[in-house]
Image: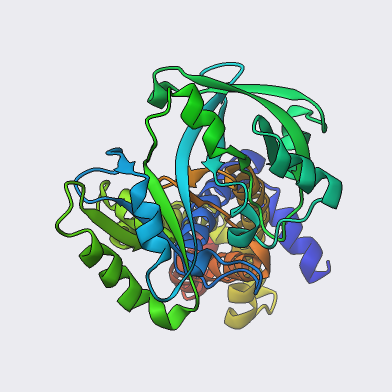
Amino acid sequence: MPFARLVVKNVLRNRRRSLLTAASVAISILLLLIFWAVYRFLHAPPASESDRSHLSLVVTARTSMIRPMPMSYRRRLEALPGVLAVTQVFWFDGRYKNEDTVIASLGLDPQRVFVFFPNWRLPAEQKDQFLREKTSAIASRHLAKKYGWKVGDRIYVSSPSYFGVGVDLLLRGIYDADESQSYIVFHWDYLNEALRSPNVALQFWVLAENEEVIPGLMKHIDEEFRNEPVQTLTQTAKQLALNFLSWFGNVKLILASVSGAVAFAVVLIVANSMAMSIRERTTELATLRALGFGTRTLLTLLVAESFALALAGALVGSLGAWGLCRYISGVTVGGGLLVNLEVGLPGALLALAAALAISLLSTLAPALHAARLNLAEALRDVG
């Protein structure tokens, strides 16, 4: 019987146990890849040269992210050296149709949108209409497909953060981007009027000229408003997200700890499954030895069986992680950083390495024990 066929036959011998073992591996690999994708996203460089997120600073009130700042701050920010552009921001956690459908909505200065997001592409006529009409909005291709929007549609979104105040938007453009950026963007002036013109901003976004000026610029901004009634806290977009997540604890330690626990648990599960399988086949393995199968051949056979189970689970887990990452992408954290999780080829290689490690760690010990049993005793074994 060919070696591969023998491996498949042994894997399918106890189908329920094999299915449960592969399912355990799949869930574990899915969790590991999600944690890895989150860590990679938070520590990754910009996705493309046209992505300016690494040059964007977020200015909020020092005492609270929801404390408004006067609009006069914008002119002072624009006058600072090293500043390329500034826009006031209303971060609008818009509810669309029902409370469960949350859309990342931004009220910005329309003249600055494409300075901060130069990688957004849409036809020139759509861009011009968006800039001219106060009630107009543009949305990502991802959102348009998800909700069936087309140019010219009216979209009403409201927010509990603004006491249920809503905006009735006219979709004038659908943009494409190199990355998964799923915002709907509208005019800051329109929301300001809907809120009865408080003329304040919860955030100011500052675009730095280059990465070298960012550390000094952050200090300069906060020093500029140190003696004002509303002092500022300036952070990079990613640092703001990390600080937001840190409310739940040390993100890096949590990811590492949970990943380690998941890996340890799955090794125990597969090891228990393989130990049971090997123990039940003591006489069979002894018979193979009597027929001339060497210890190395038996070890290879048993590890191959374990690897087949782990690989099947890893494939399912990888597909699940890929789908979940695509679903999660577009969610925002920290009041403005758009999540973009990817598994990709590195994730696939990680899953393959994890499957190989699981098969080796879970099988070698029981397989060595079975292969070294006294042949006479093993042949008399009745389970």
Looking at the image, residue 328 lies above or below residue 208: above
At 22% from the left and 58% from the top, the residue drawn is 225
On the image, the x and y values in percent for residue 88 come to 45, 48
Image point (56%, 70%), residue name = 46
In-front residue for pair 72/92: 72
Q: Is residue 312 visible?
A: yes
- Say which of 108 and 360 sits in front: 108
Image position of 293 with respect to 136: above or below? below
The image position of residue 165, as x and y in percent, is 47, 19
**Is residue 73 left or right of 25 when viewed as pictured?**
left
Quadrant where the N terminus is found in the figure = bottom right
Name which quarter of the figure residue 258 lies in.
bottom left
Above or below, 43 relative to 245: below
Relative placement, left or right, of 249 versus 51 is: left
Residue drawn at (14%, 57%), measured in percent from left and top? 227
Q: Quadrant of residue 196?
A: top left
Q: What colouring method underlies this structural image? A: rainbow
